[in-house]
Amino acid sequence: MSNPVADLVAGFQELVGQVPDFLQPLIVAAAGAVPFIEGEISALIGILGGLHPLVAMSAGVLGNLTSVVLVVLLGSRIRSGVVARRSRNAPVPMMAYAGAVETGPVNEEDTAVAPEEVKPESKGRQKIRQWLIRFGVPGASILGPLAIPTHFTAAIFVASGISKGRVILWQAVAIVIWTGITTVSATLATLVIGT
């Protein structure tokens, strides 16, 4: 049984070798837009395909960041719609129907919503939530790629109510850091192997 991500990486590598030089960065950027490949692996694809490391890194970052921004913008719209719908459909306490003004807290029974079936969280999601609590958005963004792809991290942040500007900023920082580390490591490895 083959690994779909490995097959996809191999496909992108083959494609980079087959297209003219001026199209190679576009293939690397397209690879960077794919979860589990992202900027890091796409930069490696570009370097192995013969691109200058800075071009490969820039294309990988651009592809990864573009797709993450789309996830954040779409996720933000979805969250806004869900929150608006829930507030419209929230049960109104009985005292409000009588025209009474409440001065104390609302009873949980008055606003209770039928319990939904809760799926267990994956280990990656649990890790992101722990890092978010412990290190905030900056730390969780930077550590996030160790647990799950940046696309999923960004979606979790937006679903949690973190502003889309803040999510985009820190995801961009994380993408540049991790793609940069991978690019420098691959460049040094090719220099060592080449000598």
Image (spheres, helix red, strand yellow):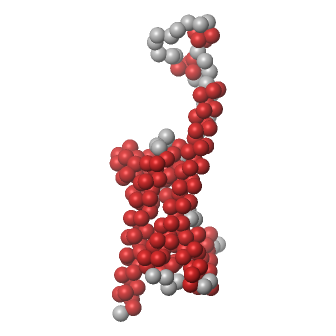
**Residue 161 vertical placement versus 39 (above, below):** above
Q: Residue furthest bottom?
A: 195
Quadrant holding the C terminus = bottom left
Residue 93 seen anywhere in this rendered image of the structure? yes
**Residue 186 vertical placement versus 33 (above, below):** below
Quadrant holding the N terminus = bottom right
Residue 119 seen anywhere in this rendered image of the structure? no
Q: Toward the viewer: 61 or 117?
A: 61
Image point 58% across, 69% down: which residue?
30
Image point 56% across, 45% down: which residue?
76
**Residue 119 vertical placement versus 66 (above, below):** above
Q: Position of residue 25 (x, y in %)?
A: 54, 76
Q: Toward the viewer: 130 or 135?
A: 135
Q: Position of residue 11 (x, y in %)?
A: 62, 77
**Residue 54 vertical placement versus 72 (above, below):** below
Q: Position of residue 95 (x, y in %)?
A: 58, 9
Image point 43% across, 76% down: which residue?
54
Q: Toward the viewer: 66 or 152?
A: 66
Q: Position of residue 90 (x, y in %)?
A: 61, 24
Image point 52% across, 77% down: which residue?
45
Residue 18, quarter of the rendered image: bottom right
Tally the numbered discs: 0
